[in-house]
Image (cartoon, rainbow, N blue to C red):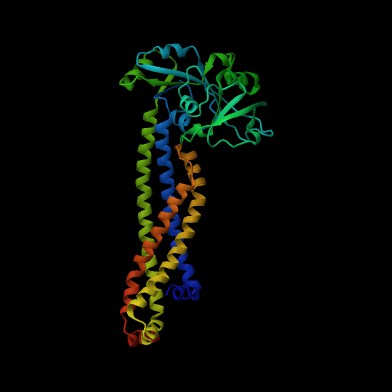
Amino acid sequence: MWLAAWRNTVRRPEQSICTVIITAILIFTVVMFLAVFLMIKEGIALSEQRLGADVMILPAGAEIDGSHTLFTAEPANIYMPAAILPEIAAVKGVSQATPQFFTQTLNDSCCSISTATRLVGFDSDSDFILAPYFAEQDFQRLEDDQVIVGGRVEAFLGDVISILGRPFKIAGTLYPTGSGTDETIFMNIDIARELASDNPEFKGLVSDISPQDLVSVVLIKIDSGVSKSQVINRINRLGLEIQVVSTAEVVGNVRKQMGAVGQVIWGLGMAILLVAALSLAGRFNALAAERKREIGLMRAMGVQRFQVFQLIMAEALIMAVAGGFIGSYLACIFADPLVEAIKAAFILPAGLWSLATALKCGAVGLSLSILIGALASLFPAYKSAALEPQQAISQGVLE
């Protein structure tokens, strides 16, 4: 029966290809929507789990906000006096406070980063952001000639990287976070400051102040059970030229935005699904109508009604599987570039596109294709099987 269905499908290439294309477009669209939704949802979840800090302190005049700082790795040359750190750390309710110093790669030589990448200098004595990674890897301390890279930073032969003309050994790669950390390079804060002070490109950014006296951001962890809003108010009352950002609020805003966008996306997806299902139903109905004479001859030769029903359903499922596979495959190829474009345009966190996610999305697409193909062909197959042989032949000759 399946062999006969396959032969009937390839015997009508134009009709079959048209049906496969309609199915592929439908599944491509649905799987793309699903992939984008899953990756951004995973990115938000990872960000909440692994950001580490409850509050971020940024310079008052910083041109970037908390979303840029958390969810992108764009170079951010923002600075404020390091002298604010003791005042912030002394605020009631602040459990830990650690500074970071931002700089960036600029050169494009062999074994160097090919694009401008954010370099983050961290203070190993007070750091609690990378500490969980160090504990997990049984790693004690980062040496001055070593760096830790995010999960999306390109790998280099021999694990040696040139940053602003200085070679560094890659000591490890961070787990994915769905945030800008994935595309960031981490080093000891004093070394990051040295790189900035030695490079003429940065002299105009820091004016006459030595990089040793500057920080870019202060990350804060709040005592358990203490109101975050109260701590933020206390920090604001210090009268420093800073902006205080709650990381939970940033992530929460992203979640709300994604909720609204998700409703629109799924609304469009359902509309496309309905239109495509009706189109497929029309296609299968037309194909069945074209074959009335053939079906009548089959019935006259002794083929039972249920066998006719099975044959038409099998043909529909073959085309549905072909369209579903093509649509799912193409969607899995283009999903990651699309998510990266959306992430850059809207400053959203996104999880890593993995084989497991691709297989999940592909399986959903293929299953949906089979389901829609079966439902769309159910009535045409039933109607064709219900025809009497003489009626089917006469109608087929007239049409």
**Considering depth in this image, is 31 or 245 the residue closer to the camera?**
31
Residue 214 x, y percent position in the rendering = 53, 16
Among the 4 quarters of the image, the one containing residue 324: bottom left
Among the 4 quarters of the image, the one containing residue 45: top left
Left or right: 133, with 159 as reference point: left
* Depicted 372 relative to depicted 81: above or below: below
State which quarter of the image contains the C terminus.
bottom left
Residue 88 x, y percent position in the rendering = 42, 14
Residue that appears at 59% across and 21% down: 143
**Considering depth in this image, is 163 or 14 the residue closer to the camera?**
163
* Depicted 132 relative to depicted 263: above or below: above
Q: Is residue 399 visible?
A: no
Residue that appears at 64% across and 31% down: 160
Residue 182 x, y percent position in the rendering = 51, 34
State which quarter of the image contains the N terminus.
bottom left
Residue 194 x, y percent position in the rendering = 61, 18
Outermost residue, front side: 138
Q: How many marks?
A: 0
**Considering depth in this image, is 197 or 62 the residue closer to the camera?**
197
* Depicted 349 relative to depicted 334: above or below: above
Q: Is residue 68 visible?
A: yes
Residue that appears at 37% across and 39% down: 257
